[in-house]
Image (cartoon, rainbow, N blue to C red):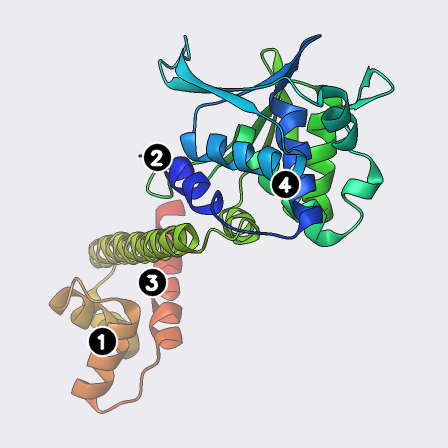
Amino acid sequence: MSFTSNIKNEISNIEYGYSEKIAELSAILNIGVKIYEDRFEIYTENISVARRIYKLIKEIYHVEIEMDTSGVNSLRKNKLVLLIIKDKIDLILEDLSINKDGIRNYIPSMYLVDELKDKQAYLRGIFMICGSINDPKTSRYHAEFVINNYLTANYVNDLLNEMYFNSKVIKRDKNYMVYIKEAEKISDFIKLLNATSSLFYYEDIRIYRDHKNMTNRLNNCEQANVDKSMNASREQLDLISKLKEIIDFDLLDEKLKTICIYKEKYPESSMSELALIISSETESKVSKSCINHRFRKIKEIVENASKK
């Protein structure tokens, strides 16, 4: 079972107040309803969501509902659940702000979503009928809502951004996709859905992935530092070799001779390590900056000699 299905199964059994139920049902019908003269129908691929819709309509409007589970999605080959309502059609659709005076309405009336809890309920309904969230074990964090109407898609996008989810909307084929990419924002959205078990699962995986990525970055950084130190050591040894070719080593300044002797003795040492070794063995305090300065002096001697 997918992560999205787990979330929908979990939130389909949560009870809310009357206004929240109305807002949730309005969102579901806005996206999923097909209206005919004598009935309206709602399709869903999730049996828990179908039961949720059935329960809400039955509880609020006390009408008979037909349920058909024989359908199959021709693209994904998933089973479809069809709910058919033939009673109180005009009353239900107008009450839920789907139709108003016989005109299809794609944005809910303000009285349905005038409070924060009702806006959250509306987003829960949107997620139930057309939302999905990638399993955090996959390579990317992604939540999306596939909506076939431009007005509804932009309304949902605005509603999400009103709650700081940083969502965006793009055209995709014949539909519009509203999506969230940030891992933390997706976590906040799962929290909004009240999917507690799914949230714990998501956060456990996210923390593990973040820790693993941090470890990899540190390892890469450490390896880069090792490579940088080795390259620097090779360049320093090369300078010393060239220095010996162009000048009598015994005539060198004592400090430069010391740095050359110890670098050849400890060829893989970094400048910090070389400073500690020289300080320890000569009982003369030498810092990393001193080592760096002396190698710059050696480089200067070699470069000046090559110009002659």
| Cα distance between the residues tagged 3 and 1 | 12 Å
Are the two marked residues, 1 and 2, in contact with CB atoms closer than 8 angstroms? no
Kind of residue sitting beneath label 1: Thr
The tag on residue 214 is: none
Which residue is disc 2 drawn over? 2
Residue 7 percent across, percent down from the top left? 43, 43
First-in-chain label (4 vs 2): 2
Residue 150 quadrant: top right
First-in-chain label (3 vs 2): 2
Q: Residues within 10 Å of mark 3 (few under 14, many from 20)?
A: many
Q: Nearer the viewer, mark 3 or mark 2?
A: 2
First-in-chain label (4 vs 3): 4
In the picture shown, does residue 260 fall above or below 157? Answer: below
List the single residue furthest toward the left: 265
Q: Nearer the viewer, mark 1 or mark 2?
A: 2
> Regarding mark 2 in the picture, which secondary structure is present there?
loop
Kind of residue sitting beneath label 3: Ile
List the single residue furthest toward the bottom: 283
> Regarding mark 4 in the picture, which secondary structure is present there?
helix
Name the residue located 47 percent from the left edge and 51 percent from the top edge.
195
Name the residue located 68 percent from the left edge and 26 percent from the top edge.
30
Name the residue located 72 percent from the left edge and 28 percent from the top edge.
92
Name the residue located 14 percent from the left edge and 68 percent from the top edge.
266
Residue 25 percent across, percent down from the top left? 64, 35
Which residue is disc 4 drawn over? 123
> Regarding mark 1 in the picture, which secondary structure is present there?
helix
Q: Nearer the viewer, mark 4 or mark 1?
A: 4
> Regarding mark 3 in the picture, which secondary structure is present there?
helix
First-in-chain label (4 vs 1): 4
* Image position of 129 (left or right of 46): right
Which residue is disc 1 drawn over? 258
